[in-house]
Structure formats: C-alpha cells, structure tokens
Image: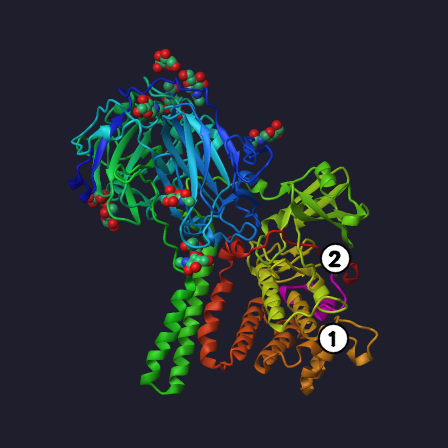
C-alpha cells in the first residue's frame, strides 16, 4: 500500500522497461469475443469501421430493460460514425447491463453523444456509471464535458480485470431532480495484460512500490498519442480497436521540434518478449525529435502539456524506437525525461534500451497528483550531456497516459471540467460597471461617450477574438482535454441511402404521403430507422439539375449545420434518381400560420422569435460556414417550424456558394420568387448577401401585416406589400395595415424598431441595407422592448446598452452555435418540408 505521506508531493517511479519484462506471452482468452452494443437500437448495424453493433433492445445483455430508446434530434457533422452515436438509451432510474465475460482484462468503451433526445434536454443528463466494485463516472455532466473539450461526442475508455465471469455496468442518474442517465454505445474488447510489468529493471530510486500496480488495477485512458505521426483509427489497431491521436495539439509553445518517419530500409521489430500488441508498428514508425541544431536544442525543452484530473495516480507509458540512420549505436542520443518538472529519467538512450535501430521499446513511469479538479501534466525532454553523446537531441514515438483506480476511493471519476470562459461575461461587466463608476465622477455627457467607447472597444476585441478563433478553428478544436479519439470522417457526414431504402421509407412513394410538389420534384413524408420521420425530396426526372450539381449541392449542404437551418440527413443517387432526405418539420411553413389558413393566429412575441430564429439561420449562412452562402429564395414558405416552434430556414439547396471570399457578389441566372426580388438583382444581375436581406425585409412586413407580398386582387397601390407598407410608414399609418389580430398587442417602440428594421432591409440600393447581423440585433432589441413593455417596465436606453451587447456577442459566436446550440433544441420528431404549400412557389 502507499503511505499517505507520499501523497503530499508529486512522486514518481520508473516502473519498467523493455527487454527483461516478462509479459505473459501472446496467449489470452479468445473464448470471449468483442461485444458492440448499440444502445437504443433494435437491429444489428454496421459502423463506419464495419464493426457490427448489436441493438440492446431485447439483447441478452439487457434483461428487464427499463430504459427508453431514443434517437438524437440532431446529427453533428463531426460525429465519426452514425452508429452508435445517433441512438441512445435513456435511464431515469438505475439500470444494470450484465455482460458474461471470461475472466481477464478487458477494454470497456462508453460512447456518449450529448444532444437532446426527444424531451430529454442534454443539460439534464447528469449521472454515474459503476461496475461491480468500481465507480467509473460520477455526477457526470456529458454536455459540460463535451463543451469544455469543444467536442460533440465523448468516448471514455477503461481497462478492467474481470474475475467474476461477468461484468455489470450500472447507470445511475444523479439525485438532482430531473436528472437522467444515457449511453449511446458500449464496447467491450478482451485484451491480454498490457499494463502490469512484473520485473522492473531500470527502477531508479523510486518511492512507490511498483507492486502497487497489481493485476487487478483498473485504468482509464486519458491520452494515447502517436507522437510525430497521424491519428490511427481503431481499425488501424484492429487487435483492440485503440485509437491514437496526433500529439501536436498538446505541444507547449512554438517549439515543436521536427517530425519524421522511418527510413524505408528500417523494419520495426519487437525485441525479446515484448508483445507486438504493445503498440502498432505505425506508432513506432514515426517520431518527433528536437531538431538538427544542437545549440537550439540545448536552449529549450520539448514539452507536451496534458490536462488531467488531480488527485489520482497516473501511469505514463513512453514508446521509443530509433528509426533513421545514422543513429544505430549507443550513446549517439541521450536525454532527460521530465514529468511535472522533475527528472524521472536521465541518460535515456533508446538504442541501449532497445538493442538497435528499428527495435521498439517503452518505459513506464508512475506519478501521483494531489488536489482536485483539473491540472496540467507537463512532459518534457531535454538532451543529457553527461555521457557526452554524439548528438544533443531527444526522441519520442508514442505516449500513453492512464489514470489509475485510486486505491483508497474505489473511484475513477473526476470532476466535470470547467467550461471555457464565455465572451459575453467579459464584456458585460466591463462595459457596464466601468461606465457606472465613471457616472458618479464625471458629467453625464462625457460618461455617455466613455461608455460608448468602452462598448465599441469590447465589441472590437470580441469580434477580433472570434475571428482569430475561427481561423484557427482547427487547432482550437484539438485543444481538448478529455478526448482520446480524434479521427474524423467527413464522408460520413451525410448518409447515402439506397433506392430500396427510399422505397421502404415512403411505401414506394405513396401519394398519401405526399407533402407537396415543387420545381425540384415531389416531397414525401417518410420513415427511416424504424420511426424517424423525415421529408424525402425526390427529383423530377425532367429536372434540369445535373448530376454534378446534385453532388456539389450535397457536399455543400452536408457541411452546413445550424440549429436554425433545416438539415440534410442524407441522399440517394441511383439509376436516374436523385433524392434528398431532410429533417421533418412538424409544424410546416411559417406562411401557413400567417394567412389563408384555418390555423390560429400567432401571437406577436412568437412571431418575433420566429423572425429572430430565421435571421440567425441566414446570418449563419452568410458568415458561418467556410464559404459564404447566399440563400437566393428567402420567403415565408421557406421558413419552417418544428414542433417547438423553432424556426429553421430551408431550401438553401439551390443556393450558390460564393467561391471567392473577396468577391461580394455572384453573377447568376435569376432565381427566386416574385414579390421578394431584390430590385438591384434585375438591374445589375448581381447577387449579394444583401439580396437575401431584401427578401427578409419583405418577410418581416409579411409577418407584420399577415398578407402575401403580392396580391393582385387589391387596388393597384396595395398590390405590392413592400410599396404599400413603405408608403403607409411614410405617412404614419402603418399601424392601420398591420394584422388586425395584432392591433393593440405590439408595444409602440417595438413596432417602430421592427418597422424601421424592415424598411432598411428593403432599401432600393443594396448598400443602404443592413447586414444580416444588424437585422438580427435590431430584432432582438425589438423583442426586448416588447418584453419590457409587457412587464410594465420602461425600456430605457440604459437597459438597451447593457442587455443588447451580450446578445450581440451570442450572435457572433457562430462557431459554437454550429456545434452546440443545437443541443438545446428539443423536439422528438423534427422538421422540414419546403413545399408543403405548392401554391407558395
Ligand atoms: C496459454 O494458456 C494455456 C491455458 O489456457 C496454458 O496452458 C499455457 O501455458 C499458456 N501459454 C503461455 C505461453 O503462457
Ligand atoms: C465495409 O464493407 C464494405 C462492403 O463489405 C466495403 O465496401 C467497405 O470498404 C468497408 N469499409 C471499411 C471501412 O472497411
Ligand atoms: C442507484 O445507484 C446509486 C449508486 O450506486 C445508489 O446510490 C442509489 O441508491 C441507487 N438507487 C436505487 C433506487 O437503487
Ligand atoms: C451540465 O452542464 C451544462 C453546461 O454545459 C449546464 O447548463 C447544466 O445545467 C449542467 N447540468 C447539471 C445537471 O448540472
Ligand atoms: C424535487 O421534486 C419534488 C417533486 O417534484 C419537489 O417536491 C422537491 O422540492 C424537488 N427538489 C429539489 C431539490 O428541487
Ligand atoms: C486478473 O486478476 C487475476 C486475479 O488477481 C489475475 O490472476 C490475472 O492474472 C489478472 N489478469 C490480467 C490480464 O491482468
Ligand atoms: C538504409 O538507407 C539509408 C538511407 O536512407 C542508408 O544511409 C543506410 O546505409 C541504409 N542501410 C542499410 C543497411 O541498407
Ligand atoms: C503479432 O505476433 C503474432 C505472433 O506472435 C502474429 O500472429 C501477428 O500477426 C502479429 N501481429 C502483427 C500486427 O504483427
Ligand atoms: C513546470 O514549470 C513551469 C515553468 O517552467 C511552470 O509554469 C509549470 O507550472 C510547472 N509545472 C508543474 C506541474 O509544476
Ligand atoms: C527543462 O525542464 C526542466 C524541468 O522542468 C528545467 O529544470 C529546465 O530548466 C528546463 N530547461 C529549459 C532550457 O527550459
């Protein structure tokens, strides 16, 4: 046992090395084969790696199932595979899966994709997972963990030694009201003993007794890095389906050293009794060294920083292999290994340890950390000159970090990681409190200026920061602390359906399932995956759209994901068929809730929220994705509502992607709908984002007045909604033409803000129109004015400046929205149909 006094400082010990390690030979129970359980699914399905996942409905591992099967309401584009992430099992009370397993060591991998599952919001997932005698996760907030790591999904890997002949995995919701537990997939892979090392040889003056890692110790994988190489996906390490990630995101500072691969005439070999499953040859075949310049090397440490949970033991396994000539002999390269600024190894000479070039070896070190919460683990290498080596350099090929079962606590669970600071929290206090303090001291006029300047300053900083973050988005994403899996497969973003599947989904395109007809073809309601309702758009064989265009469109659409855009689930391209599968929007188009309808009129606030939602979607199209997208056909029939009244913009499929970031316009064939056209579009044949703004302005008037943009049955001056509304606004009679149902319901300042905004949008010249971001801000201000009026609180300028700024920040946070805001969108069955009202086209 470990003496408690040792817990006061960070301790380490070199546990083992290569050659003399007697690891049980490659001889382990193959009688138990891997288990892949797709929770919440009822049938067998293949994942992206062709591993076959069994559904847990009526599975022999899941007896007396009391959990609820649910499907994710949103498919994040970064999901590596639909199986097992898109279905989940939800538990509102304790539930235990029971897996019969022959005794021995196993990997248990738990897959979590925190999004809304029907009525279960992602924020309410708060739970624990335990085995027969060990808590793996406790008070686990999957959504927070994913958010902190800037990841959409979480994979947790544990290594356990099962002795009882079975493994029970219990999911238990936390005691907090409304909490539930969930899991998307459970993977169990038997392994030989790859951890415990029985005869440590290079054990320097260690303070921890190596026997503390006994054969029963449980581990959680924190990091598994292929240093100097690329990510290795599970089937690249097919024995145990481990994934290895690229180490570069974890390197400290700009001192990256150099990466290199093995010389072609070098073969990776596993010397002596070292099993070849210790790590795949690909890990040893690439490496990072400090670089060719010895003077530079002496002046820096090659450092990795890995965030871990404090208060646990960690096993760090360093994989080494010399792979390039001329380093073939001892004492050519010798270096220090530091962990948390302490020397754990001096005179590390890979050739001496391994026996030669191309021969793999590894070294294990055990450390203990104190405290709680998150801490950084520093791993560094530096040349050791004490033996006068030929080169002043260091090398590393792979690094694994495992958290050990804390022997006292029977617990592997850490705390939830803190969320990264939100930009809006910096801005608000600065802008407001700074202003507030000054107010007492200086005249009001100066104060106003100061507040304004402060506000502008903050806005600029935030915008710039946001921009930077956007450009370095890739790196940002990789700065994750908890994730061990980092492979991506863009080809899987969008599902490829077979025509046969489409026939089943729509009962062979049954007319009774027809939702609408349009220029592109027919839209059907369909059902896929045993119960997910979707909208299926089948192209008209005579449609002019070519195959190439169809493919480009799918590529574009599958990249565009946002909570206020109707997302594409998949497509089918077979024979002459071109079919698109979208989310299903339960409440149809906005248009059918406004006029010529039997549906009850929408209250004003609801309408404002819908406008804001649609504006967000358009704003994202204009600024969010890599390329700017111009919708080209913004209209009330293309704004759809889901069952929770969330507005989503649809039918941007035929939009043209702006290929050149600098070009602000696209010349193109006129497409769009009469009544919404940008007049400049006719004159100049130029399409810009502001053409969408124009159409959106018409939509705003349409929502306010509840009439179509063009109605030829009306007297001439009233035919065009835009002209009519503008002339009424000019003479101050706009209040008389608004939807009679809204009379008296709209706060006067809100109406003014809204109408001003609409008027600016439909300005004749595009340069006079605001950008979508400004429209969005104005609408949010209008909503706030309405809310204040309803709460009888006077809406003062002061509250405007303090409240709108953070909103503005939220809007700018498009990166985040694309990944996470959608988590908050609930609704079991969702979305779509752009042509529910064929007349609208
Ligand atoms: C492999 O396992 C069998 C029993 O399962 C045992 O008899 C044999 O000695 C083992 N071989 C090695 C090399 O450990
Ligand atoms: C999965 O199997 C299919 C058909 O057997 C094959 O075409 C595909 O390449 C396989 N994919 C992977 C990742 O192995
Ligand atoms: C569920 O499991 C937790 C954790 O072991 C336990 O504290 C709780 O009492 C269990 N609840 C029920 C109803 O069994
Ligand atoms: C989980 O974290 C999210 C933040 O991502 C938070 O909104 C939510 O309240 C947390 N849930 C619980 C139950 O603490
Ligand atoms: C939990 O819910 C129950 C009933 O719904 C309520 O009486 C209790 O006050 C709630 N507890 C907390 C901590 O919110
Ligand atoms: C698992 O634990 C048992 C009992 O301690 C031990 O005999 C066995 O070697 C262990 N297996 C592995 C793979 O560590
Ligand atoms: C292997 O190739 C390197 C150059 O890539 C060369 O310097 C070395 O001599 C070769 N070694 C053998 C044994 O062929
Ligand atoms: C590992 O070694 C075993 C024999 O010991 C061999 O069957 C297997 O193919 C090797 N695996 C790899 C990836 O080289
Ligand atoms: C290691 O040293 C650096 C400065 O050289 C310091 O910033 C860092 O906090 C130290 N790390 C630990 C774990 O003490
Ligand atoms: C490298 O790290 C060690 C341990 O933290 C420290 O003592 C040493 O000063 C560092 N060297 C350089 C050049 O930063």
Residue 339 occupies which quadrant of the picture? Answer: top left
Q: Is residue 48 above or below residue 481?
A: above
Nearest the viewer among 371 and 576 is 371
Q: Is residue 753 magenta?
A: no
Nearest the viewer among 372 and 671 is 372
Residue 271 visible: yes
Q: Which mark is residue 35?
A: none
Residue 215 occupies which quadrant of the picture? Answer: top left
> Which callout, 1 or 2, points at the residue further toward the start of the chain?
1
Q: Which secondary structure lies at badge 1?
A: helix
Q: Is residue 774 above or below residue 387?
A: below
Q: Which secondary structure lies at badge 2?
A: loop
Is 604 positioned to the left or the right of 291 in the image?
right
Q: CA distance from mark 1 to mark 2?
A: 23 Å
Q: Which residues are magenta?
A: 671-690
Q: Is residue 301 above or below residue 317?
A: below
Circles 1 and 2: CB distance less than 8 Å? no
Residue topped by disc 2 = 836
Residue 226 visible: no
Q: Is residue 174 above or below residue 356?
A: below
Q: Which mark is residue 721?
A: 1
Position of the N terminus, as image quadrant, is top left
Residue 665, position in %: x, y?
64, 62
- Around disc 1, counting alpha carbons within 10 Å, would you say few (fewer than 14), some (14 to 19), or many (20 or more)? many
Residue 217, position in %: x, y?
31, 31
Residue 70, position in %: x, y?
56, 45
User: Quadrant holding ligand 3?
Assistant: top left
């Amino acid at each position: 046992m470990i003496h408690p006094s040792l817990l006061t400082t960070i301790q380490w010990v070199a546990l083992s090395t290569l050659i003399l390690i007697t690891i049980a030979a490659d001889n382990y129970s193959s009688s138990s084969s891997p288990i892949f359980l797709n929770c919440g699914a009822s049938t067998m399905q293949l994942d992206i790696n062709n591993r076959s996942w069994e559904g847990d409905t009526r599975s022999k591992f899941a007896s007396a199932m009391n959990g609820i099967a649910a499907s994710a309401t949103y498919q994040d584009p970064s999901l590596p595979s639909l199986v097992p992430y898109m279905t989940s099992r939800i538990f509102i009370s304790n539930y235990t899966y029971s897996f019969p397993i022959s005794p021995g060591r196993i990997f248990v991998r738990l897959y979590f994709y925190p999004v809304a599952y029907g009525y279960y919001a992602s924020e309410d997932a708060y739970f624990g997972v335990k085995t027969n005698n060990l808590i793996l996760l406790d008070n686990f907030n999957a959504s927070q963990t994913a958010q902190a790591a800037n990841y959409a999904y979480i994979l947790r890997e544990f290594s356990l030694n099962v002795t009882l002949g079975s493994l029970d995995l219990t999911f238990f919701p936390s005691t907090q009201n409304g909490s539930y537990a969930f899991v998307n997939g459970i993977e169990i892979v038997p392994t030989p003993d790859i951890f415990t090392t029985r005869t440590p040889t290079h054990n320097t003056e260690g303070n921890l007794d190596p026997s503390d890692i006994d054969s029963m110790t449980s581990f959680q994988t924190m990091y598994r890095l292929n240093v100097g190489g690329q990510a290795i996906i599970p089937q690249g390490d097919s024995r145990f389906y481990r994934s290895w990630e690229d180490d570069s995101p974890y390197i400290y500072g700009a001192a990256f050293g150099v990466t290199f691969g093995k010389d072609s005439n070098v073969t990776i070999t596993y010397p002596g009794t070292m099993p070849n499953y210790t790590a795949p040859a690909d890990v040893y075949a690439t490496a990072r060294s400090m670089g060719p310049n010895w003077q530079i090397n002496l002046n820096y440490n090659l450092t990795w920083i890995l965030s871990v949970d404090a208060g646990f033991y960690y096993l760090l396994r360093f994989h080494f292999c010399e792979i390039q000539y001329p380093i073939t002999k001892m004492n050519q390269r010798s270096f220090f290994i530091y962990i948390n600024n302490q020397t754990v190894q001096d005179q590390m000479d890979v050739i001496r340890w391994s026996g030669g070039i191309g021969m793999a070896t590894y070294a294990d070190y055990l450390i203990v950390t104190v405290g709680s919460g998150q801490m950084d683990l520093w791993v560094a290498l530096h040349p050791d000159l004490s033996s006068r080596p030929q080169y002043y350099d260091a090398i590393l090929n792979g690094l694994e970090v495992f958290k050990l079962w804390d022997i006292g606590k029977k617990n592997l669970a850490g705390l939830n990681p803190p969320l990264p600071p939100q930009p809006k929290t910096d801005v608000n206090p600065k802008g407001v409190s700074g202003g507030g303090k000054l107010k007492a001291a200086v005249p009001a006029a100066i104060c106003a200026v100061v507040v304004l300047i402060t506000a502008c300053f903050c806005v600029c900083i935030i915008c710039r920061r946001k921009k930077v973050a956007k450009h370095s988005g890739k790196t940002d994403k990789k700065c994750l602390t908890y994730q061990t899996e980092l492979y991506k497969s863009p080809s899987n973003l969008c599902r490829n359906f077979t025509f046969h599947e489409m026939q089943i989904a729509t009962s062979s395109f049954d007319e009774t399932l027809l939702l609408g007809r349009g220029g592109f073809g027919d839209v059907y309601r369909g059902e896929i995956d045993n119960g997910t309702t979707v909208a299926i758009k089948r192209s008209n064989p005579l449609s002019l759209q070519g195959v190439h265009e169809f493919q480009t469109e799918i590529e574009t659409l599958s990249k565009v994901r946002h909570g206020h855009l109707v997302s594409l689930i998949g497509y089918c391209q077979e024979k002459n068929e071109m079919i698109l599968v979208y989310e299903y929007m339960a409440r149809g188009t906005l248009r059918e809730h406004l006029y010529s309808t039997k549906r009850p009129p929408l209250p004003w606030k609801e309408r404002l929220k819908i406008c804001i939602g649609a504006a967000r979607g358009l704003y994202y199209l204009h600024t969010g994705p890599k390329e700017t997208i111009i919708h080209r056909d913004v209209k009330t029939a293309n704004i759809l509502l889901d069952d929770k009244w969330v507005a989503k913009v649809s039918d941007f499929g035929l939009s043209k992607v702006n290929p050149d970031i600098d070009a602000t316009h696209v010349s193109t064939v006129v497409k769009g709908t009469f009544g919404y056209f940008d007049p400049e579009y006719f004159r100049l044949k130029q399409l810009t984002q502001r053409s969408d703004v124009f159409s959106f302005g018409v939509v705003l008037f349409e929502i306010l007045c509840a009439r179509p943009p063009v109605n030829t049955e009306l007297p001439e001056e009233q035919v065009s909604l835009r002209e009519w509304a503008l002339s009424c606004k000019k003479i101050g009679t706009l209040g008389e033409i608004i939807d009679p149902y809204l009379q008296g319901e709209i706060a006067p300042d809100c109406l003014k803000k809204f109408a001003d905004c609409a008027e600016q949008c439909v300005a004749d010249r595009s340069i006079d129109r605001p950008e979508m971001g400004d429209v969005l801000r104005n609408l949010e201000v209008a909503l706030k004015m309405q809310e204040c009026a309803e709460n009888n609180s006077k809406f003062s300028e002061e509250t405007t400046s303090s409240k709108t700024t953070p909103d503005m920040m939220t809007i700018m946070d498009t990166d985040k929205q694309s990944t996470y805001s959608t988590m908050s969108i609930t609704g079991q069955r969702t979305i779509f149909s752009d042509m529910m009202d064929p007349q609208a086209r």
